[in-house]
Amino acid sequence: MMSYPAIPHFVKTMGHRVVSYILNVTEAEGRLILMQKLGLSRTQRDTLNQYVELCRQLRVSAVEQGESEQSFFYRLPHVMQNGRHIFNVWRAQQGGELATRVNSVDPLISAFCQLAGELYPLFLIKAGHRPHLFYRGAGYLTAAIEQFPISKIVQKRILSDPSLERLFDAIGNDPQQTFGDYKDATGHRGVVSLASLPVSILINSYDLMRIRGIVSADRFVSTVQEMLDIARSLADGEVAHIPMFVGFRNAALTNLAELDTKWGSIRRYTPSIAEYVLQAPGLMAKRRNNGFMLESGYAFAINFGDFLEDDDWPDEVMDANTDQQTTELNITLCMALCYLTEYKPFVAPEWVWRIDPFSLDNRRQDFGSVAETSDPIAIGELDLVDIERWSMLVDDTDSSGIRLAMSRLYAAAKRPNTQGALVDAIIALRNIFAASDDMARIESAARHLVNAPLDISMISALAEDWQALLTGEFFEDPETISEKVNDCVQLCLVCLHHLYLQHPHLISRADRLQALCDLAETQTSDR
């Protein structure tokens, strides 16, 4: 084993993945190499030294030409040898395999996947705070693509593809001048050109692969095929279900890597997933034990060409955002009902990321969520039966009647020490029982529903609080308000728990309060 060359700090910050790829070692070994804690063979040492020297030279050259030190990152894609990038040449010298060639009868897929395999190692470079070299830097990837002979073949086959060629309104003398406008149902507009289409598909494919957590050249190539299939469907005017990911806090998978549900696949935050989707060092460690991620689908379509200004979207597309919110609320409700113990935290969404093949904008969105708990729900194998039972019950029940309650409970949990939160919690209670006028009858209905000792005085007190809030005569301190909100939220969840189990057919009936009171009277008379 040979000693190490000196590894500058700026090279270390470029990440271990590119080193492990070049030297044909595992990612764990790549980390150890950057820490200089793993022995190297002579050929590995020579290759590592070439990599370090190349980075040094490009950095010095950038400074000498009056550019920023960071600009050397974008010189790296242009270091070629016999039509291949130097990183792939070095990997081959170390006995490593390159991305599997796709011998498809589809000429576009074959060429596109070959291009993806050539570019893969460049995506592994971390450039400053960017999670990869081309992250939202589409121009740099455009320039990198042009270095590869296969890129011209890809462009030619895109233009001859019966689906994708429809995207281009104008055919110019170069890839930038061959373009078309498009619009999606949200009103977002974009331009796709012959130069930008390979870029957007590659960037979104890499995003998709990284979010799913398994990182390899072959996985990248297969994800590119997936993105191409979606792009073709959209170009054919079809509705495509693009990948959508939603991150949740306050619960985590303990001894499970993945959980299949009616709403999609739930995954734990592995270090690789957390690094990419959270992009905040302070959250990465936390989310391993306090969070999970859902992968689902999102109905998506685009209009272009003669139909660009057509706003007659399919119902499935128009309902996509509502369906997303319903799924989020169903998961929140399912977790609340499955783990019904005193003051358990609300499991709630905190970010969403939708991946489509054409967008060069980051479609990841953060939204205000409930407070983060230090005692998250631990989801283990023993919980699978209960989770499946509750997910089926929630999904199979017409819950439209209590959607207001769920959204208000979620809102109350975000800021429990405010008067607004107490208003939200009381509205939720009234909505659960459809008590539009008088809260007094809720006591009778709740007593029958739960059939266990309930703090009836709490309901009476909440009715008094409601009147005080409406008249501006409510003067409790934040700590007292928080206690009232938590008590009301817990009462709501207990009532929902029993309502789903005993009377799911009543949940969306407008007369459910009367029906429950009638049942209570019948039960009393039978005694």
Image: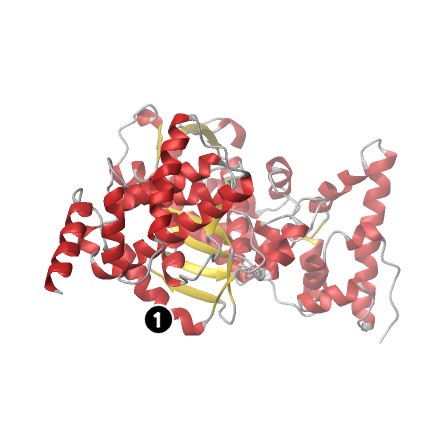
Name the residue beneath numbered marker 1. 385
| 438 left or right of 251 in image | left
Position above or below: 24 against 75: below
Position above or below: 394 against 75: below
Looking at the picture, how far across and down is residue 447, in whole percent? 26, 56
Residue 300 visible in this rendered orientation of the protein: no
Corner quadrant of residue 12: bottom right
- Quarter of the image with the N terminus is bottom right
**Residue that lies at the very extreme toward the bottom in this rendered image:** 1
- Quarter of the image with the C terminus is bottom left
Front residue of 131 and 182: 131
Q: Callout 1, which amino acid? A: Val
Query: Which residue is drawn at the image coordinates 33% and 57% (left, top)?
Result: 454
Query: Which residue is drawn at the image coordinates 74% and 52% (left, top)?
Result: 14
Which of the colour schemes (rainbow, by chain, secondary structure, one colour) is used? secondary structure
Residue 78 visible in this rendered orientation of the protein: yes
Looking at the picture, how far across and down is residue 37, in whole percent? 81, 70
Check disc 1 and report its element: helix, strand or loop: helix
Position above or below: 311 against 369: above
The count of marks equals 1
Front residue of 466 and 401: 466
| 495 left or right of 9 in image | left
Crowding near the residue tagged with mark 1, few <14, some 14–19, many ≥20 C-alpha atoms within 10 Å: few
Looking at the picture, how far across and down is residue 316, in whole percent? 27, 41
Looking at the picture, how far across and down is residue 338, in whole percent? 38, 62
Corner quadrant of residue 38: bottom right
**Residue that lies at the very extreme toward the top in this rendered image:** 309
Front residue of 168 and 470: 470
